[in-house]
Amino acid sequence: MPALTVRLIHRNDRDQLTELVNQHVSAVVPGVSVSVNTVLSGLERQPDEFITDPWVGERITLVAEQCRSVVAAAHLLRYRADTEVGEDYRDAGAIDWFVCRPPAASWPDSDEAAHLLMSACLAQLARWNVRARYASGELPAPVVYGLPRNWPHIRAVYERAGFRHVGDTEVILIARTVDLPANEPKPGVTIARTLGECGTRFTAYAEAHSVGFIEVDTAVTRAERHTRSAPLADVGNLHIAPAHCGQGWEHRLLAQAGEWLRLCGVDRLVAYEAATDQTAIDQLRSAGFQELTRTDRRWEHRSQSPV
């Protein structure tokens, strides 16, 4: 086989890169794919990251190529060192995402491609002389962040390179909106629909007193930028006043949100909980959710030795 090469991305790599990205996305969330435009736009800026994206001073995308085929790719960020940048990010470098073909008989050199690309990533971070080195899997697609458990081949590359998981683990759950609790009116209870911080907010009132609210975002797939995305929404916030916990208000709010989402043509709802909060996870399971995946956030490079 011809030798593998690692180089900067070219514009004519866009279709192969998008295919590789979508292969990774589809392993995490069903029915979602991103367009070429979405992938290319994400190499220039990340509009959803309105806090951290302005802190980025430099961006580089590398690909590993063999026989004119892109077999691996990585997107790197260098954060500025000035005081406007948050302390954790200041003068840091990050592998924002890393994708590669998993080992298979049809791609016997996939391990070597991942190894060469990771070596190039570490070399770039060394040239930047950054204070800290981070890694993640923030592909430009909904529900894909951290390092999903569905990518054991990427985890192996990170760990072999000296990256270690030092952050939290989150459980991502999904429910069909038709499986959410039924909306059953209750005397003395009203639910108001307003604009919330993270989407459409439904606030439950009992005897004119607010007892809790849920916010659902129906714009997570950003339809204008995606070629194919099954109707999907996520829970931005779900809060019940402490005095009313354990009284079924979560189900009542999810029922109201589910009715609204079905009117919007949304057939699936995603929720996120810390892996340590088993009570919240169990409440969502009892309301029709099932675990989609787990994702490990914040990876840090602890070794300065080569791969």
Image: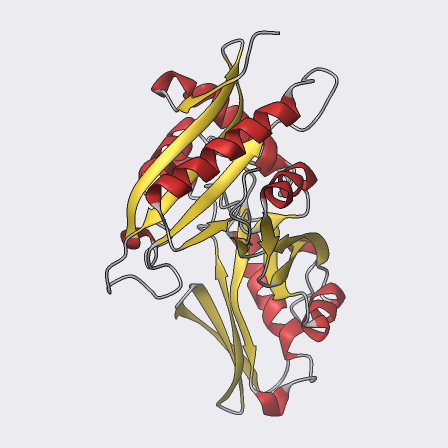
Residue 243 visible? The answer is yes
How many numbered tags mark residues here?
0
Left or right, 71 with reference to 125: right
Left or right, 286 with reference to 154: right
Q: Is residue 275 above or below residue 228?
A: below
Q: Position of residue 277 (x, y in %)?
A: 67, 72
Q: Residue at x 60, y 30 (%)?
A: 23
Pick the front one: 98 or 268: 98
Q: Position of residue 295 (x, y in %)?
A: 62, 53
Q: Quadrant of the N terminus?
A: top right
Pick the front one: 264 or 290: 290
Left or right, 301 with reference to 126: right
Q: Position of residue 110 (x, y in %)?
A: 64, 23
Residue 46 visible? The answer is no
Q: Residue at x 60, y 60 (%)?
A: 271
Pick the front one: 52 or 108: 108
Q: Residue furthest front?
A: 305
Pick the front one: 269 or 54: 54
Q: Residue at x 44, y 50 (%)?
A: 219
Q: Residue at x 45, y 41 (%)?
A: 140
Quadrant in which residue 177 is drawn: bottom right
Q: Position of residue 98 (x, y in %)?
A: 52, 37
Left or right, 197 with reference to 165: left
Q: Is residue 90 above or below residue 28?
A: below
Q: Is residue 229 above or below residue 169?
A: above
Q: Quadrant of the C terminus?
A: top right
Q: According to the image, what is the colour scheme of the structure?
A: secondary structure
